[in-house]
Amino acid sequence: MIDAVGNPQSVLLLGGTSDIGLAIVQRYARQRPLRVVLAARPSARLEAAAERLMTLGCTVHSVPFDARDPNGHQTVVDKAFAHGDIDLAVVAFGVLGDQERAWQDVQVARELAEVNYVAPVSLGVLLAERMRAQGHGSIVALSSVAGERVRRSNFVYGSGKAGMDGFFLGLGEALRPHGVRVCVVRPGFVRTKMTDGLDAAPLSVTAEDVATAVVEGVRAGKELVWVPGPLRWVMSALRHVPRALFRRLPM
């Protein structure tokens, strides 16, 4: 169970090598020892992540996970819950991809759609089933401002995030009567390995900034968290810009 000051005892990180996801887990681990399940493809990075968490006093289990293998999603969730209840599940996987190839190459487009939308929906349904059964828990879904108003520069990625965002907002409404919370997180540009080589956008943040906002948001029972906070007002304004003008903006 999540304790009186908002700290979970057990965390499932779907996307076990995600910079943001690991920053969230580490932020919680500094408050109390955790039982952590890292779900990701086996790799040296996954092993290093597990070792880093163990130095913080965590008990760590690693579970093989491939977002593009829908037949394996049930197995991943079963293994994650095999050691007991999961207080907090963080959906932190995704792929940016080559955005120009994505709208011209059906294989690339399909990969982005499967990883950024289909897999989160599949796993969201499975997590909801488990958390309803245990009667408690929180799900954190890492979305993106890219899904708030889809831009020409990354519309394949943005459309996947828009769908994922909408699904988890709706899932939160469906789970509310069952004592399960969902927090959708919309970061702007985050300086991580995923964005290496890209020019940082205004209001860019670090993985640690996102982790701080997530921990505070979950503790406060928020359903939607913007990182950084002012992005909420920026995107609210951009949402109402006429399309003819919007396409001329340097975005």
Image (tube, grey):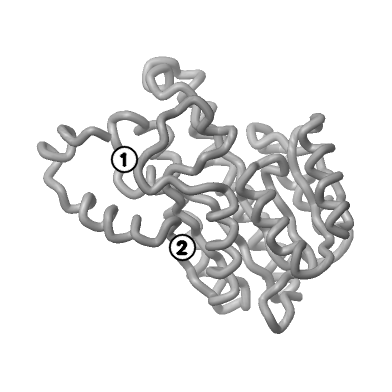
Q: Secondary structure at mark 1?
A: loop
Residue at x-position 72% and y-position 56%? 26
Asked if one can make out residue 163 in the rendered structure from this viewpoint, the answer is: no
Separation (CA) of disc 2 from disc 1? 19 Å
In this view, the residue in front, 197 or 38, is 197
Numbered circle sitting on residue 71: none
Left or right, 53 with respect to 176, comes to right
Q: Secondary structure at mark 2?
A: strand
Q: How many marks?
A: 2
Q: Position of residue 152 (x, y in %)?
A: 28, 30
Who comes first in sequence, dot 2 or dot 1? 1
Residue type at tag 2: Val
Residue carrying label 2: 225
- Quarter of the image where the N terminus is located: bottom right
- Quarter of the image where the C terminus is located: top left
Asked if one can make out residue 176 in the rendered structure from this viewpoint, the answer is: yes
Residue type at tag 1: Val
Closer to us: mark 2 or mark 1?
2
Q: Are marks 2 and 1 in contact (CB under 8 Å)?
A: no
Residue carrying label 1: 150
In this view, the residue in front, 110 or 156, is 156
